[in-house]
Amino acid sequence: MGALNIKDADVAKKARKLAKLKGTTITAAVSEALDESLRAAANDREAREKRIDEALARFRAAIPPDAPSYEEIMEDMYDENGAPK
């Protein structure tokens, strides 16, 4: 069992107010609030990852099939020593 000491008076006041509004203990109120926040953060991350995946799919779909690869582009731009051609 871990201990948590809240030194910010405003945070402690909010925790007490939340517990009173919910009719529960401060510990239970804080635990529930943290659970809700963790779920929201996980959902936000999943949504962000989905948007990134969708953007990458659109980007990849826009690349012509005969487009040169990264390696081919680099070979055209730089010599074997890494100097620009």
Image: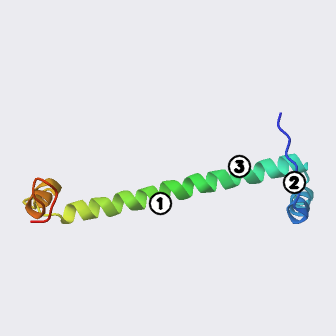
Q: Amino acid at mark 2?
A: Ile
The answer to whether residue 11 is above or below residue 2 is below
Residue occupied by mark 2? 6
Q: Position of residue 39 (x, y in %)?
A: 63, 51
Q: Give left or right: position of 76 versus 38.
A: left
Distance between the Cα atoms at labels 2 and 1? 32 Å
Q: Is residue 42 left or right of residue 80?
A: right
Q: Is residue 57 left or right of residue 19?
A: left
Residue at (89%, 55%) from the top-left corner?
19
Q: Secondary structure at mark 1?
A: helix
Q: Position of residue 62 (x, y in %)?
A: 19, 66
Q: Quadrant of residue 61?
A: bottom left
- Give the x, y percent position of residue 11: 85, 62
Identify the mark at residue 48; answer none if there is no mark: 1
Residue 21: quarter of image: bottom right
- First-in-chain label (2 vs 3): 2
Q: In this figure, which residue is indicated by the disc labeled 3? A: 35
Which type of secondary structure does the marked residue at label 2 adopt?
Answer: loop
Q: Please tell me which residue lies in front, 82 or 63.
A: 82
Give the residue displayed 65% in from the left and 51% down from the top.
38
Report how far apart the C-alphas of labels 1 and 3 lie in the structure.
Answer: 20 Å
Badge 1 crowding class, 10 Å Cα cut-off, few under 14, some 14 to 19, many 20 or more, is few
SS for tag 3? helix
Reply above or below: 33 against 77.
above
Q: Quadrant of the N terminus?
A: top right
Neighbourhood count class around disc 3 (C-alpha, 10 Å): few under 14, some 14–19, many 20 upward:
few
Q: Position of residue 70 (x, y in %)?
A: 17, 57
User: Which one is earlier in the sequence, the residue at label 2 or at label 1?
Assistant: 2
Give amino acid for label 3.
Asp
The answer to whether marks 2 and 3 mark residues whose Cβ atoms lie closer than 8 Å is no
